[in-house]
Structures are given as structure tokens and as C-alpha cells.
């Protein structure tokens, strides 16, 4: 299965850069930054970009899909710059490309598909007024879609218990997207470089869950067995 394309940096348009530093809460015992911390940096940069753009928007953005290609993991105390830009759009979704570049050689390429939701109904809604003027030039007419791409878990795969905590919930009252990457940290001895993609299917609440495992894939299901997310790994 092909992972989402990593579009090149734009030749024109808005590119926003946020700053971060790998702290104690971001790293594994080895000193490398964890995947969930990288996902949080990307989430924070996306929010900071939206605030800085001054685009009037009372909608809610949620991640449908995120690919992380880690060429070299940032390390403890390493300062990083998170450059982010809109690399494609649809009527209800937008794609955001990002590059995380560390002072000491850390390098992560990322691409995320974000869905724009109405805060009252929770249903997808069109982009806010002025979106095309602010973010259209970097997207350069590239169109993206929100359809699911990962395969469902087959019958008979290995299952291990998992649990989401109340502390994993965010302002939307469901498990924050960055938390899902903790399952990979728990289940895999991560290689470097690393290349993987998560696809969110349904929001998760705090409580019991399941991890389903097969070669090259990991699925996360709720306690009732309903599929919440899938993670595809590239060898």
C-alpha cells in the first residue's frame, strides 16, 4: 500500500515556521524524541499558523490521516524548526505538509489531512471565508480527498489489550490524535529511519481498547471492537 505523497515545498505562498525544543517529556530513555511528541509539535504548529494567519474561523479541525517519515529522530535538548504549509485542499478538507528540522541533524517529513468540522454538529463543513486567499497559493490548485485508504483488520489477527486514559482526552472530549502514536512506541522497536502513517476512522473515548497486529499494520479498536484507527508501516 502506498503511503500519502510528500509534496515538495511550494514555490510561492504562505509557509509558517514554529519553534520547539525536545524536552524531558518528549523523549524515550534513549534520548530520542517519541513519535507522539512529534505529532504534538505538528499539531501545535498547525494551530499557531491558523492563529497567525488571522483567518476568521470558528470551525474545528481534526486529523483524518498523518504520515511521519523520520530520517533522523531529534534528540533531547535539540531545538527544532517546524515549517508548515497547505499543500492541497478540497471542499471540506485541507492537506498540510510540514518539515521538522533540528539544529543537530534531526529531520522529519510529515503530511496530514485535516477535516474542517462545524463545532455544534460535528459534521464536515466548507472552508472559512478567505481560506483560498491565505492558503490557496501554496496549494497551487492541488486537490485532495478524505476517503479512507487503509485496509480493515482481517479476522484472526493478534489482539492485545490497550487503554486510553482520561488524561488523553482533549478539548473536543475525545482522545487526542497524538496519543495514538504511543501504541507504536509501545509495540515496536522503532527503526531509524522510520516511515509510518495513521488513519483515524472514529473518535475514541477514555476506556478499554484493543491493539490488533499483523505484519506491516497495526489497528486500534475500541472495547466494543469497533475500529478507531489503523497504522501502516513501510519497511
Image (tube, rainbow, N blue to C red):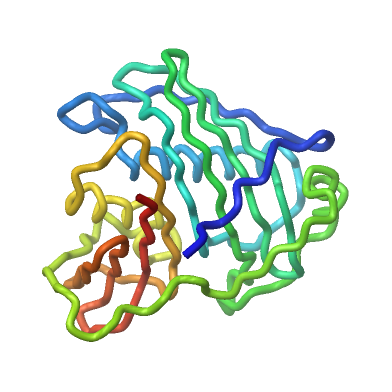
Looking at this view, is 163 or 109 the one in front? 109
* Tally of numbered tags: 0
Looking at this view, is 215 or 11 the one in front? 215
Tell me the residue at 79%/43% (across/down): 138
Tell me the residue at 73%/54% (across/down): 88
Position above or below: 36 against 132:
above
Please state the horizontal and vertical placement of residue 186, each as a whole percent of the image.
18, 50
Please state the horizontal and vertical placement of residue 227, each as a whole percent of the image.
33, 78
Tell me the residue at 58%/44% (across/down): 46
Rendering quarter of residue 32: top left
Tell me if 3 is positioned left or right of 134 in this view. left
Tell me the residue at 59%/75% (across/down): 147
Position above or below: 158 against 95:
below
Position above or below: 112 against 82:
below
Tell me if 174 is positioned left or right of 135 in this view. left
Looking at this view, is 195 or 169 the one in front? 195
Rendering quarter of residue 134: top right
Amino acid at each position: 500500500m502506498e503511503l500519502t505523497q510528500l509534496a515538495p515545498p511550494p514555490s510561492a505562498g504562505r509557509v509558517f515556521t514554529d519553534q520547539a525544543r525536545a524536552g524531558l517529556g518528549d523523549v524515550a530513555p534513549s534520548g530520542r524524541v517519541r513519535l507522539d511528541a512529534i505529532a504534538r509539535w505538528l499539531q501545535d504548529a498547525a494551530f499557531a499558523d491558523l492563529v497567525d494567519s488571522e483567518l476568521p474561523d470558528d470551525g474545528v479541525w481534526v486529523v483524518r490521516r498523518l504520515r511521519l517519515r523520520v530520517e533522523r529522530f531529534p534528540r533531547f535538548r535539540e531545538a527544532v524548526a517546524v515549517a508548515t504549509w497547505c499543500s492541497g485542499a478540497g471542499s471540506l478538507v485541507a492537506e498540510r505538509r510540514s518539515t521538522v528540522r533540528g539544529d543537530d541533524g534531526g529531520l522529519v517529513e510529515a503530511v496530514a489531512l485535516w477535516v474542517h468540522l462545524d463545532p455544534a454538529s460535528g459534521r464536515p463543513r466548507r472552508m472559512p471565508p478567505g481560506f483560498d486567499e491565505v492558503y490557496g497559493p501554496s496549494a497551487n490548485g492541488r486537490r485532495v480527498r478524505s476517503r479512507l485508504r487503509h485496509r480493515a483488520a482481517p479476522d484472526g489477527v493478534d489482539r492485545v489489550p490497550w487503554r486510553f486514559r482520561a488524561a488523553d482526552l482533549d478539548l473536543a472530549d475525545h482522545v487526542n490524535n497524538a496519543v495514538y502514536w504511543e501504541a507504536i512506541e509501545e509495540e515496536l522497536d522503532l527503526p531509524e529511519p522510520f516511515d509510518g502513517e495513521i488513519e483515524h476512522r472514529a473518535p475514541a473515548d477514555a476506556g478499554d481498547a484493543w491493539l490488533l497486529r499483523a505484519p506491516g499494520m497495526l489497528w486500534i479498536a475500541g472495547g466494543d471492537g469497533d475500529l478507531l484507527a489503523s497504522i501502516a508501516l513501510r519497511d
